[in-house]
């Protein structure tokens, strides 16, 4: 989570060194991973789209390109191309130095990010229920819940920005950031699991179903663990309790290490080889 994003409000200036360190570590790790993923999207999807090599989508995306289905293909194209704005622009939007020094850029990037997140979520929702994707019905439902989160959080972020209640605006922007990256968290979590087990334990790679994927889908989309960690971070700042601060810092650090492992696995095993 982006550290110090709320510290412009004097009521929220409490930031113990350990909590601040783990928040920074999480944000830096996530940013590196997201920008690598963004480079992968550009290298694979932008290149193949603008050169007309649509069949290349199917090497990395199930049912990516279907001959004759121009509506479905258009949705996929919009979804993956705009996704680069989410993973590259999101971290930029949350860096305090950029926000404070380049306010016009921050405002326009924020507007672009919000609109993009809504479009990507709506297109993704339609894709899941019309064209289908990997996984089972539970994963479809979890994805749909994620789309609802994105729409609600985007509306609230805009509402508080218009009211100039910037503390609340930043909180809802951070929540939006977490849910808008649900697919990225899912991929990173899956790769961390595969690196640890060195095999598809707990799921069938052919049907892409199984108890592990059900749990991962739940905590990536339906009940996002990223948002839970963020709320713990907010609460630790609010109550200023040493025990809870240590516990929150330890949990954030643990999941940052898991995320880093997943980023490494995804980068070396999936993203770089296809770029």
Image (spheres, rainbow, N blue to C red):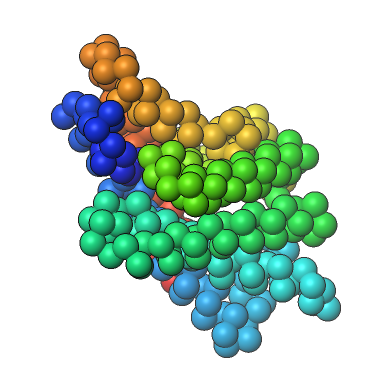
Place of residue 112 in the rendered image (x, y in percent of width and height, measured from the top left): 50, 65
Point out residue 43 in the picture as x, y percentages from the top left corner. Answer: 46, 74
Relative placement, left or right, of 130 versus 11 is right
What residue is rendered at 59% in x and 48% in y? 155
Residue drawn at x 73%, y 39% is 141
- Quarter of the image for residue 25 reads top left
Position in image of residue 116 (x %, y %): 56, 62
Is residue 157 in view from this perspective?
no
Q: Where is residue 16, by image quadrant?
A: top left
Q: Residue at x 63, y 48 (%)?
A: 151
Q: Residue furthest left?
A: 17
Quadrant (top left, top right, bottom left, bottom right) of the N terminus: top left
Q: Is residue 26 above or below residue 248?
A: below
Residue 114 lies, with reference to residue 275, above or below; the image says above
Q: Is residue 172 above or below residue 62?
A: above
How many numbered circles are shown?
0
Residue under the image location 35 percent in, 28 percent down: 233
Tell me, yes or no, if residue 275 can be seen here. Answer: yes
Q: Position of residue 21 (x, y in %)?
A: 20, 35
Q: Residue furthest bottom?
A: 51
- Out of 275 and 151, give the one closest to the viewer: 151
Q: Quadrant of the C terminus?
A: bottom left
Foreground residue among 39 and 112: 112
- Which residue appears farthest toward the front when viewing the image? 163
């Amino acid at each position: 989570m982006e550290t110090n994003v709320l510290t412009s409000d004097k009521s929220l200036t409490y930031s113990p060194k350990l909590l601040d360190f783990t928040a920074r570590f999480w944000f830096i790790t996530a940013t590196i991973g997201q920008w690598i993923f963004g480079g992968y999207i550009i290298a694979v999807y932008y290149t193949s789209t603008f050169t007309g090599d649509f069949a290349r989508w199917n090497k990395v995306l199930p049912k990516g390109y279907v001959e004759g289905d121009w509506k479905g293909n258009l949705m996929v194209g919009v979804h993956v191309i705009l996704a680069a704005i989410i993973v590259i622009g999101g971290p930029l939007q949350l860096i305090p130095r950029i926000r404070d020094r380049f306010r016009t850029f921050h405002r326009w990037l924020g507007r672009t990010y919000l609109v993009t997140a809504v479009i990507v979520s709506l297109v993704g929702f339609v894709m899941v229920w019309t064209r289908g994707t990997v996984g089972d019905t539970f994963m479809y439902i979890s994805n749909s819940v994620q789309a609802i989160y994105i729409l609600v959080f985007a509306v609230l972020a805009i509402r508080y920005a218009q009211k100039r209640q910037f503390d609340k605006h930043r909180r809802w922007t951070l929540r939006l950031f977490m849910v808008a990256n649900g697919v990225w968290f899912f991929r990173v979590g899956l790769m961390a699991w595969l690196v640890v087990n060195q095999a598809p334990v707990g799921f069938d790679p052919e049907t892409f179903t199984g108890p592990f994927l059900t749990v991962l889908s739940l905590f990536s989309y339906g009940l996002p663990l990223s948002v839970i960690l963020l709320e713990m971070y907010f609460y630790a700042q609010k109550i200023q309790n040493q025990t809870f601060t240590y516990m929150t810092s330890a949990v954030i650090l643990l999941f940052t290490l898991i995320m880093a492992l997943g980023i490494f696995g995804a980068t070396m095993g999936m993203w770089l080889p296809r770029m």
